[in-house]
Amino acid sequence: IAVDPSVIPLGSEVYVEGYGNAIAGDTGGAIKGNRIDIFIPSQQDAINFGVKQLKVTILN
């Protein structure tokens, strides 16, 4: 996932509600503050997942 490294350090393992475990491995130009960007390979699956407010837990 893409994160703001001032909020979630790069390399952190996180749990994203409704998605599962992920690694904070990227930053994005529009990712500021409490936003993340989840890579979903299929465009249709990404559309179905949509934009959501989810709880993210840093595991390490």
Image (cartoon, rainbow, N blue to C red):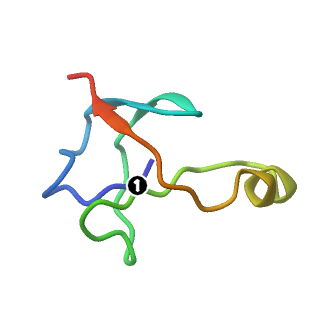
Rendered image quadrant of residue 25: top left
Secondary element at tag 1: loop
Residue closest to the eye, 55 or 1: 55
* Side (left or right) of 50 relative to 32: right
The reply, left or right, for residue 13 in relation to residue 40 is: left
The amino acid beneath tag 1 is Ala
Q: Residue furthest bottom?
A: 29
The image quarter containing residue 28 is bottom left
Counting from the top left corner in percent of width and height, residue 48 is at: 80, 53
Residue 39 in picture, x, y percent from top left: 59, 50
- In the current view of this chain or complex, which residue is farthest to the right? 44
Residue 54 vs 12, above or below: the answer is below
- What residue do we see at 41% from left, 56% from top? 36
Q: Is residue 37 above or below residue 8?
A: below
Q: How many marks?
A: 1
The spot of residue 19 in percent (x, y) is 58, 33
Query: Disc 1 marks which residue?
Result: 2
**Residue at the left extreme?**
6
Q: Quadrant of the C terminus?
A: top left
- Residue 50 location (% of width, % of height): 69, 59
Left or right position of 5 against 36 = left
Disc 1 crowd rating (10 Å Cα; few below 14, some 14-19, many 20+) is many
Residue at the image position 31 percent from the left and 31 percent from the top: 57
Which residue lies at the image location 33% right of the left edge and 55% below the top edge? 3
